[in-house]
C-alpha cells in the first residue's frame, strides 16, 4: 500500500517470530518500504535490499540514501526495512537511554535497566536475527536473488545475511562498513581513530580554498594538547539573547572533529571554518572556536527523541549482541569490570595521542555493554567458522570519512574473496552521499548491473 510518509514508496509489514526457537514468545512486525523500478519496458533486475545504519535507525534512513543513487532506480526495486526494535518494527523505548546520560555510571545504569525491561527478549535484537528477518521478507515478496546495499552499521546485518543465505545473493555493496568479528577490539576501543581524524581533517583543509592554515595537522594536534591541559572556557552571545557560558574539553573537540565535513545524515561542520577557528585560538582569539562549539555540541539530555525516529534501546541491544568484548558474555558483572580495567591498563599510554586515555574514554565507552544481561540464547552476527560467500562485492570508503575511516573499512576486504575495495576521494559518510558527487553512485550501479567495477577513475579525484 502507498506510504503516508512518502508517496513514491509502498509500505508494508510482515510478522515474524520474536524468538525463532521459542514460538511461545510471540511475534514482532517487520516494517518495510518499497520503491518500485521506474522503467517498466523491460524485466526488472535483481531487487536491492537495504538495512540502515545506527544501529537504532529505521529503514527510511537508508532508503533516503539509496534513492540518491540514480543509476539503480530504473531497473531495480529497492526494499528497505525497519530492523526489529526500530521504526515501525516494535521500536524499543528504554527511557533512561532515550533521554540521555551524563557520565559512564549513568550509562551503565541505563543499560542495565533496558536489559531488565526487555527480559528474555534482550538477546533478540542482534544482526543474526535481523538477517533472518530480511530472509523472511525476501520470501514474502517472492524474490529469488537479491542485491544487498548497506552503509555504516547496516553492513553488520548485511554480513550476517551473507554467511547465512549466500544462495540468494547476487551482489553486495558495503558502504563505510564495519567488520563483525573484532578479536583485537579495534572498533570497540576506536584504536587508530584519533590519527585518522587528524589526517582527514587536515586533508579536507588542504582541499578547501577558504582554509588558511599552513600546517593543519600540526594545528589540530596543538589544539587537542591544549585542551587536554586545560579546557577552553568563555561566553558566547546568541542573537537576541544573553551571553552563555561555553566550555570545550578534549572530548568536545573529538566530537567536533568527527563532525567536520563528514555526515550527510548527522550534520556537518565546514572544514575551513573549523580549521581557521583552531588557528585563531592558537593566535589568542578564542571566540570563533567557542561559537562553533556552542552550535555543534550539546549535553546528553538534548539527545532525547521519539524512539520510532531513533531508538537508543535498539542501539544498545544490537551493539551488546554483536560486538566482541574483552570479557565473556556469561561473566558476572564484577568479573567483566575486572577484565575491562585490566585491558585498559594494558593499553599504551599514547594509544590515543594526542588525546589522553581518560579523555578519550569520555567519548568512547568500551564498557557500554558492561551491565547488559548475560544472554539466554546468544545468536552471533557471524557464527564461528562461517564462510563468506564468493559473490561480486564492492567495498567503499571515503577518504574524508571521520566516522568510519578507510583503515576500518578496508578490513572487510580480507573477508570477502571476490571483493573490490575503493577509497573515494572527497567522500565522507556515507560514501554514496550526494554531497560528495556522483562517483560512488556510478560505482554501485556498475556492480549491480554488470557484476564488475571496471572504470574506477572517478574515485581518484574529488568532485
Image (tube, grey):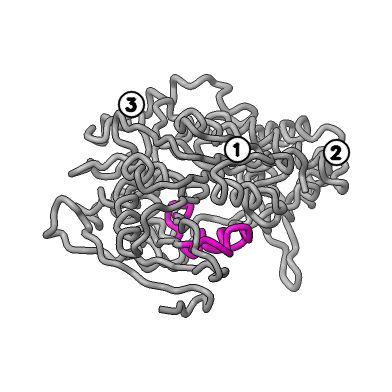
- Where, by quadrant of the figure, is residue 321 drawn? top left
Is 430 placed left or right of 205 in the picture?
A: left
Q: Mark 2 points at which residue?
A: 213
Residues 38 and 84: in front is 38
Is 303 placed left or right of 266 in the picture?
A: left
Residue 66 on the magenta span: yes
Q: Where is residue 58 in the image (x, y as percent from the top left)?
A: 44, 62
Q: Give how far apart the Cα atoms at labels 1 and 2 are.
A: 23 Å
Mark 1 / mark 2, whichever is N-terminal: 2
User: Residues at badges 2 and 3 in contact (C-beta under 8 Å)?
Assistant: no
Check disc 3 and report its element: helix, strand or loop.
Answer: helix
Tell me what residue is drawn at x 52 percent, y 44 percent.
174
Check disc 2 and report its element: helix, strand or loop.
Answer: loop
Residues 410 and 334: in front is 410
Mark 2 / mark 3, whichever is N-terminal: 2
Check disc 1 and report its element: helix, strand or loop.
Answer: loop
Quarter of the picture containing the N terminus is bottom left
Mark 3 / mark 1, whichever is N-terminal: 3
- Dot 2 crowding, Cα within 10 Å, few <14, some 14–19, many 20+: some
- Where, by quadrant of the figure, is residue 65 drawn? bottom right
Q: Mark 1 points at which residue?
A: 405
User: Residues at badges 1 and 2 in contact (C-beta under 8 Å)?
Assistant: no
Give the extent of the magenta segment: 51-78
Tell me what residue is drawn at x 62 percent, y 61 percent.
68
Mark closer to the observer (1, 2): 1
Q: Position of residue 116 (x, y in %)?
A: 23, 53
Q: Is residue 101 above or below residue 42?
A: above
Q: Mark 3 points at which residue?
A: 339
Residue 242: which disc?
A: none
Amino acid at each position: 500500500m502507498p506510504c503516508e510518509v512518502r508517496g513514491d514508496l509502498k509500505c508494508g509489514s510482515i510478522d515474524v517470530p520474536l524468538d525463532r526457537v521459542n514460538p511461545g514468545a510471540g511475534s514482532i512486525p517487520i516494517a518495510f518500504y518499497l520503491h518500485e523500478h521506474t522503467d517498466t519496458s523491460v524485466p526488472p533486475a535483481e531487487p536491492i535490499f537495504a538495512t540502515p545504519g545506527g544501529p537504532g535507525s529505521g529503514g527510511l534512513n537508508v532508503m533516503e540514501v539509496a534513492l540518491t543513487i540514480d543509476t539503480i532506480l530504473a531497473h531495480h526495486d529497492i526494499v528497505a526495512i525497519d530492523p526489529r526494535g526500530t521504526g515501525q518494527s516494535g521500536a524499543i523505548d528504554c527511557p533512561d537511554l532515550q533521554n540521555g546520560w551524563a557520565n559512564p555510571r549513568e550509562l551503565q545504569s541505563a543499560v542495565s535497566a533496558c536489559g531488565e525491561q526487555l527480559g528474555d527478549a534482550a538477546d533478540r535484537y542482534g544482526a543474526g536475527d535481523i538477517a533472518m528477518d530480511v530472509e523472511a521478507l525476501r520470501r514474502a515478496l517472492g524474490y529469488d536473488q537479491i542485491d544487498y546495499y548497506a552503509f555504516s552499521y547496516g553492513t553488520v546485518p548485511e554480513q550476517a545475511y551473507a554467511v547465512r543465505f549466500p544462495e540468494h545473493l547476487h551482489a553486495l555493496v558495503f558502504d563505510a562498513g564495519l567488520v563483525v568479528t573484532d578479536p583485537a577490539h579495534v572498533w570497540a576501543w576506536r584504536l587508530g581513530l584519533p590519527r585518522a581524524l587528524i589526517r582527514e581533517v587536515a586533508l579536507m583543509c588542504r582541499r578547501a580554498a577558504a582554509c588558511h592554515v599552513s600546517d593543519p595537522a600540526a594545528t589540530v594536534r596543538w589544539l587537542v594538547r591544549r585542551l587536554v591541559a586545560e579546557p577552553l572556557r568563555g561566553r558566547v552571545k546568541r542573537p537576541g539573547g544573553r551571553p552563555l557560558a561555553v566550555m570545550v574539553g578534549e572530548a568536545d573537540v573529538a566530537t567536533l572533529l568527527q563532525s567536520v565535513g563528514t555526515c550527510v545524515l548527522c550534520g556537518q561542520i565546514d572544514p575551513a571554518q573549523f580549521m581557521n577557528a583552531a588557528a585563531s585560538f592558537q593566535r589568542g582569539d578564542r571566540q570563533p572556536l567557542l561559537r562553533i562549539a556552542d552550535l555543534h555540541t550539546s549535553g546528553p539530555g538534548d539527545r532525547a527523541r521519539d524512539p520510532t525516529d531513533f531508538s537508543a534501546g535498539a542501539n544498545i541491544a544490537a551493539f551488546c549482541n554483536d560486538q566482541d568484548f574483552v570479557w565473556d558474555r556469561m561473566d558476572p558483572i564484577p568479573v567483566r569490570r575486572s577484565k575491562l580495567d585490566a585491558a585498559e591498563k594494558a593499553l599504551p599510554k599514547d594509544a590515543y595521542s594526542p588525546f589522553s586515555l581518560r579523555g578519550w574514554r569520555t567519548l568512547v565507552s568500551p564498557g557500554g555493554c558492561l551491565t547488559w544481561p548475560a544472554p539466554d540464547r546468544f545468536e552471533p552476527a557471524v557464527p564461528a567458522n562461517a564462510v563468506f560467500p564468493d559473490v561480486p562485492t564492492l567495498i567503499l570508503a571515503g577518504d574524508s570519512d571521520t566516522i568510519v575511516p578507510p583503515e576500518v573499512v578496508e578490513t572487510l576486504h580480507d573477508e570477502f574473496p571476490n571483493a573490490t575495495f575503493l577509497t573515494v576521494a572527497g567522500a565522507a559518510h556515507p560514501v554514496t552521499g550526494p554531497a560528495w558527487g556522483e562517483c560512488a553512485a556510478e560505482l554501485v550501479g556498475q556492480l549491480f548491473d554488470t557484476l564488475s567495477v571496471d572504470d574506477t577513475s572517478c574515485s581518484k579525484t574529488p568532485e
